[in-house]
Image (cartoon, helix red, strand yellow):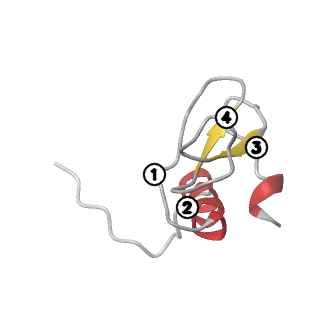
Amino acid sequence: MKPKDIKCTCGGIPKINGSDYLDEEGPWHVSCQKCGKESIPWAYQREAWRQWKIDRTDPPNNIDVKEG
């Protein structure tokens, strides 16, 4: 699945945003058009989309989580 196809947890559609008001220059980040959640800024668009995908998918089952 492409990162652009991964919707936000609220069901909103992601959009790539740049640092200027025309969204033509980086650093880039992806934000939800519905609730406004954002990924961290990256130098390249592909990195911002990858961060969006990582943030919106479940972690692997083999990660040890310490409780308490």
Amino acid under label 1?
Ile
Q: Looking at the rendered structure, which numbered label has been put on residue 7?
A: 3
Q: Is residue 24 above or below residue 13?
A: below
Tell me, yes or no, whether the two marked residues, 3 and 1, touch with CB atoms within 8 Å. Answer: no
Q: Is residue 63 above or below residue 38?
A: below
Tell me, yes or no, whether the two marked residues, 1 and 2, touch with CB atoms within 8 Å. Answer: yes
Amino acid under label 4?
Cys
Q: Residue at the location (23% across, 60% down)?
A: 66
Q: Looking at the rendered structure, which numbered label has been put on residue 32?
A: 4
Q: Position of residue 39 (x, y in %)?
A: 52, 48
Tell me, yes or no, whether the two marked residues, 4 and 1, touch with CB atoms within 8 Å. Answer: no
* Separation of residues labelled 1 and 2 (CA atoms): 7 Å
Q: Residue at the location (61% across, 51% down)?
A: 56
Name the element at disc 4: strand
Q: Earlier in the sequence, mark 4 or mark 1?
A: 4
- Is residue 1 found left or right of 57 in the rendered image? right
- Is residue 41 found left or right of 31 in the rendered image? left
Q: Quarter holding the N terminus?
A: bottom right
Q: Earlier in the sequence, mark 1 or mark 2?
A: 1
Q: Which residue is mark 1?
A: 40
Amino acid under label 3?
Lys
Q: Looking at the rendered structure, which numbered label has been put on residue 51?
A: 2
Viewer-side label of 3, 1: 1
Amino acid under label 2?
Gln
Q: Residues within 10 Å of mark 1 (few under 14, many from 20)?
A: some
Tell me, yes or no, whether the two marked residues, 3 and 4, touch with CB atoms within 8 Å. Answer: no
Q: Residues within 10 Å of mark 4 (few under 14, many from 20)?
A: many
Name the element at disc 2: helix
Q: Residues within 10 Å of mark 2 (few under 14, many from 20)?
A: some
Name the element at disc 1: loop
